[in-house]
Structure formats: C-alpha cells, structure tokens
Image: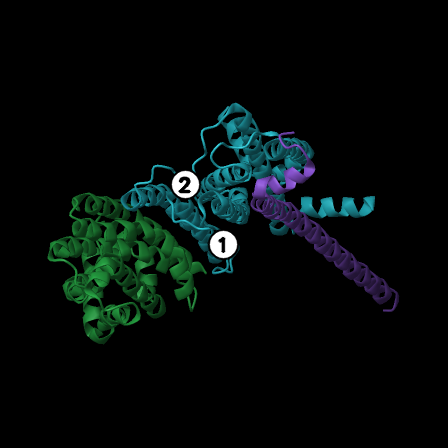
Amino acid sequence: MLNMQWTWFHRLGSPRWFYQKTQRWLPWLSAITAVLLLVGLVWGLAFAPQDAKQGNSFRIIYLHVPASFLALVGYYIMAISGAVGLIWRIKLSFMVMKSAAPIGAALTFVALFTGAVWGKPTWGAYWVWDARITSMLILLFLYLGILALRYTFSVSEASDRASAILGLVGTVNVPIIYKSVDWWQTLHQPATIKLTGAPSMHPDMFAPLLLMIIGFYGFYFLTLMLFTRAEILHRERKASWVRELVSKKRAEV
Amino acid sequence: MYFDSVYQLITMDGHGVYVWTAVVVTLVVLVSLIVKPLRQHHKILQTIAREIELEQLVKTTASQQEATDASNP
Amino acid sequence: MNMTGGFRDHLWRDLLLAYRRRGDLVKPLMFFLMVSTLVPLAIAPEPERLAKLAPGMIWIMALLATLLSIESLFSDDFRDGSLEQMLISPDLLVMPVLGKMTAHWLVIGVPLTLISPLIGLWFSLPMVALLPMILSLAVGTALLSFIGAVGAALTLPLRQGGVLLTLLVMPLYMPVLIFGSATIQSAVDGLIWFNPLLVLVALLAIAVALCPLATAAALRLAKNA
C-alpha cells in the first residue's frame, strides 16, 4: 500500500510523465484560456459600463488586476516548487521553478505598466509611490534577482538550489514588504482613496473581471507548462525516451 | 455594445490612448510568453535530431570501416 | 557535539582578523562620513531642508556603507580554505555563520551607529530624534549584516559578485529601510517612535532564526560550484 503511494509520488516527479501528460492537456487548456480571455477582454473593453468616477480608463483593470494577482501567486508557485525541489530533491520541481521566474517577471512588468498607464488619466501622474505599485516594483526586483542569480552557477543543480534558497528568502519577505510599504504609505499619505484599488464594482463590471482573472490563471499554467516542457527536453536530451520521441517525429516528417 | 460606434470604442472619450496602449503592451507580452517556449522547444528538438543523425553517421562509417578492415586482413 | 560550538570561536576569530586589518574597517565609516557631506553640497545647506531629509538620508547612507563591506564577508575564507574547514567540521554550520554575522555587525554596524550622532549634527537633526536614530541603527545594521550575509553566500562563486549581490539584497533591505527611517522620522514628527523600532526588533528576531540557515545552505552550494 505504501509502495503504491510512493510510486505514484515518484511518477509525479518524473519529467517524462509530465511531458507526456501535458501533451494531452495543452490543447484543452489553450482553448479554454483563449475563450476566457477573449470573452473577458471584449466584454470588459466594449460592453461593460464605464466607471462613474474614472470614466473609461478604468477598463485597464481587466488587465492590471489579473496580471498583479498572477505576478504575486506566481512568485509563491516558484518558491514552493523550489522548496519541494530542495526538500525532496525532485528535478521536475526545479524545472517548474526555473520556468516560473521569467513568467512571473513578465507579468509583474505588465502589472506595473498597466498600472502606470491607468494612473495618468485617472490621477494625473504615470507614477505614484502608492503602496500597491511600490510593492509590485519590489516584487519585480525580487524576480530579477532570481533571474540574475541563475547565471552565477554553471552547474545546473547548484543553480537550482541557489535560486530555490533565494526564492524562499524572498517569500518570507513578500508579506513583510507588502505590509511595510502599506504602513509607510499610511504614514505619509492619509489617503482616503486607495490609489490602485478597484472602484466599487457593479456586477456588470465584475463579471468580465472574473473571467479575465480565471483566464489569466489558465494562461499562467499554460505558459508554465510550455516553458517546463522545453526545459525538460533540454535537460533530459540524453535520455532514451527523448531520443525515441525525436526519432518518431523524424519518421513522421 | 456600451459604445455607440467603433470610433467611440477606439477613442473612449479621450481615454482610448491609455486603454489601448495598455491592451497592446499586455498582448505583446502575453504572446511572447507563448512564442518563446514554443520556439525553444522546436529548437531543442532540432538540435537533438541533428545529434542523432550525427551519431548514426558515425556509427555507419565505423561499421563500414570495420567491414573493410575485416575483408582486408 | 557541542551545540553552540563554533559560534564564539568564529566570532572571536573574525574580530581578531578585523582588528589586524584595522585600515579596512575605516572604509565604510569614511564612506558614511564623506557621502554625508555630499548631500548638503548637492542639495542645499539650509538646516530646515537638511533636517527634513535627515532620517531617510542617514539610513540610506548606512545601508550603502554596509553593502560595501558585506561582499567580502566570506570571500577571504573561501580563498584561504577556512570555509572548507567550516564545512567539514562536526559543528553545525549555522554556528560559525552566526559568529561571522555578529562579528560583521560589531565591526561595521556598531561603529556606524556610534558615529551617527555626528551625522545627525551635520543634518541639524532635532535632539529628540537622537536616541531613536541610535537605536534604529543599532538594530537595523544588525539586520543588514544578517540579510546581507545571505546574499554574500549566494554570490560567493562570482569574482565580481558585488553588483549581483546588491541586486539580490536590495529588495530584502527595503523593509528595514522603511522602518528604520520611520523610527527617526516619527521622533522628529513627535509621534510614538517605539512602534517602528519594535517592528525592526521583530524583523531581527526572524532574521536571526532564518538567515543563518539560508546562508549555510548557500555556502554548501558555493563549495560545489
């Protein structure tokens, strides 16, 4: 019984299993994600009512909020994969961690950019040091640090472990950063409006936002799979199953 | 549609520049997040395929060499 | 096996080494002092403006001065083989690491703290903020040493890890900076300055618990790189 559970656990950590399983999931996930994002975006941009206070610029929320969510969630996914890799020495976990880094960094950039563009028509400035934007910027630095650290170590195992350690240290820091920036803000700006907060939501505005958030989640996992698959092929290129796979593909051509 | 015309959709009462810039940049980033790993994937497959070809080439020339060596003692 | 073995030995060893190279110790202090003179030259010598900038500026300069010195925390031991000795010793690796971190704070952070009243004077910092400044620097520089050590260990294999070290460690330093300067600023504004200081103390407690672990793990990696 225990043996069965252990083999299941081990199979979960097998790059080959991941590669084969995702091959089948990809088409479905792509379709669902595309539909969600398309419907959500068109609905939000063209059909939802505009905000009473912010006018049409509030529509950027349909991009900004999902990107911010996933940027933050993505960091935790990266850190947890790193921790799993460190504790149980599962190679696949490290590959997922490595893939999560550029995706998270890109989404953080999107969050910052859309936030800045949102700020200009709404509050008159592209950049305001409010709590949310500042925390996002620091999150971007955390991501960039992990990406930069990758090139320190030539041995990929050491590189993985170093990134995982840094990721974990950052994880402890993320809530501290968010809280401290928040607190710092209240010290300097007794703001009555939370600058990047969502306006109170009419259900007609909220529904497309929900679609976009779910769609972004789907997108995140889609890209995570794609990056991880490429990483698997790269690291396992000497393995027999990879060779077989390539030979089969060549035969098909 | 909330807007009365496509023109209004694009300009959004002056906010159009901001909204559409945000949309375009976001889409560019999202698309590149899909394209990049796919290209890497493709490239790695090609690299491995070439390696296999090379190996086979080496093997066949080696076995040919053995055959010629065997027939010429 | 002695559980706390290595802590006192390495603390003492690092202090002794630092003493033998007294000249090196002065560098962060000189940096702190000299950059302090840059601010009035670059911005304005008016006391009111300087006093406004003081809490933040003093903290930024202390942070930069610490960053300067953190890079070499492990590099000498790495080069002369003492790191190997630490790694193969039966003592827990966190103990020598803790000793080195504490020594670094004693050698860099404490002098910075002690010289800060002079900087406060130059910046026309109100007297009421003197004690908060000293306390925030005392606790904060310890935090900077501890967090910085993690970065130093991670970038150890690099020959010019300084830039990467800065990049890695900066986001982690930001909360320290926020609460450190807030302590001083609160005092200047006449508010309760205990609160941000207590947050610093709490952060230090977390750092003392976690940073040696992360640093030790990173040091083991450096050996294999």
Residue type at tag 2: Leu
Q: Residue at x 59, y 38 (%)?
A: A219
Residue located farthest toward the right when viewing the structure as drawn: B71
According to the image, label 2 marks what residue?
A195
For this rendering, which residue is in front, A122 or C122? Answer: A122
According to the image, label 1 marks what residue?
A147
User: Quick one: SS at disc 2?
Assistant: loop
Chain A pictured colour: cyan
Q: Residue at x 34, y 62 (%)?
A: C84
Report x, y in % for residue A224: 58, 42
Q: Residues within 10 Å of mark 1 (few under 14, many from 20)?
A: some
Mark 2 against mark 1, which lies toward the viewer? Answer: 2
Kindly indicate the quadrant of the structure image that contains residue C23: bottom left
In this rendering, position of residue B49 left or right of residue C163: right
- Asked if labels 2 and 1 share a chain, the reply is yes
Distance of label 2 from label 1 (alpha carbons): 30 Å
Chain B pictured colour: purple
Q: Residue at x 60, y 35 (%)?
A: A45
Q: Residues within 10 Å of mark 2 (few under 14, many from 20)?
A: some
For this rendering, which residue is in front, C93 or C29? Answer: C29
* Residue B47 seen in the current view: yes
Q: Which chain is green?
A: C
User: Quick one: SS at disc 1?
Assistant: helix
* Precedes in sequence: disc 2 or disc 1: 1
* Residue C92 seen in the current view: no
